[in-house]
Amino acid sequence: MKDVLVRFGVAMENTLLTELDALVEARGTTRSEILRDLVRAEVSKQKVRKGEPCVAALTLVYDHHVRDLTEKLTEVQHGLGDAVRSTMHVHLDDDHCLEVIVMRGAADVVKGAAHKMLATRGVKQGGLEMVTDVARKGTGHAHVHEHDGHTHAHAHDHPHDHPHDHAHSHAHDHAHGEGSVAAVARRPKSSAARDTPPKRGGKGSAGPSGHAGGPRPSKRRA
């Protein structure tokens, strides 16, 4: 069922309204749609409550000449442990660097670490974008499989109302040495296989009477 649109009035400064109209023209949309997008973004941020699983991207622009700045940022990230999933570092110019840090964990922990890095001396500007971690918030889970050093995961999004009595073990022999299929194909036949005599009664084989492949001659009665 589609939501019903409700009209209401919004009061803002003339200069801010001018900037809003410029944004509307640039995006080719309407004032209402721009305002709806802004409200949705703010509501989404508020939904990430304290302790709730979230994923976040922290953007930092800082002066790398500031003493001990990079060490302090690294120390905060190491304190998060596995919550830091990825980082990207870009040299903007001779003085400034851009760093993007992707985090995943409890919202209050992620937010606290982000604010600590943003407040570090030498950080010029930055921002934190947080969204609810739907993968961990739901009932889905992932099974991790390891195949000869290669690990991959399969995600399953279903309720835990049935027992999991199945094993996830797979054997793959990817070696190209003595134990591989190619090596087995190249192996010579053993001496036992070469010296095995042909079966009796087969085509081209000689029976006990010396006749190849035929029945024994019958003896005449005296």
Image (tube, rainbow, N blue to C red):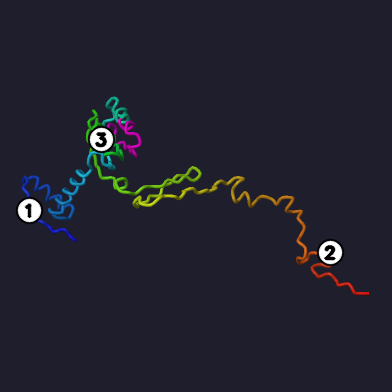
Reply above or below: 1 against 128: below
Q: Tell me the tag on residue 114.
A: 3
Disc 3 is placed on an element classified as: helix
Disc 1 is placed on an element classified as: loop
What residue is drawn where x is 29% and y is 32%? 94
Reply above or below: 36 against 75: below
Other residues around mark 1 within 10 Å, as few (<14) / some (14–19) / many (≥20): few
Whether residue 214 sits left or right of residue 165 in the image: it is right
Residue at numbered disc 2: 208
Q: What's the residue type where badge 1 is placed? A: Phe
Q: What's the residue type where badge 2 is placed? A: Pro
Q: What is the x, y in percent for residue 11?
A: 5, 47
Q: In the rendered structure, which segment of residues is drawn in magenta?
A: 76-96
Between the C-alphas of marks 3 and 2, the distance is: 92 Å
What residue is drawn where x is 27% and y is 37%? 110
Whether residue 47 sits left or right of residue 149 in the image: it is left
Between the C-alphas of marks 1 and 2, the distance is: 109 Å
Reply above or below: 43 against 70: below
Q: Which quarter shows the N terminus?
A: bottom left
Between the C-alphas of marks 3 and 1, the distance is: 36 Å
Whether residue 12 sits left or right of residue 42 in the image: it is left
Other residues around mark 2 within 10 Å, as few (<14) / some (14–19) / many (≥20): few
Q: Tell me the tag on residue 8.
A: 1
Residue 94 among those drawn in magenta? yes
Query: Furthest residue to the right?
Result: 222
Of pointers 3 and 2, the one earlier in the residue sequence = 3
Q: Which quarter shows the C terminus?
A: bottom right
Residue 132 among those drawn in magenta? no
Q: What is the x, y in percent for residue 92?
A: 29, 37
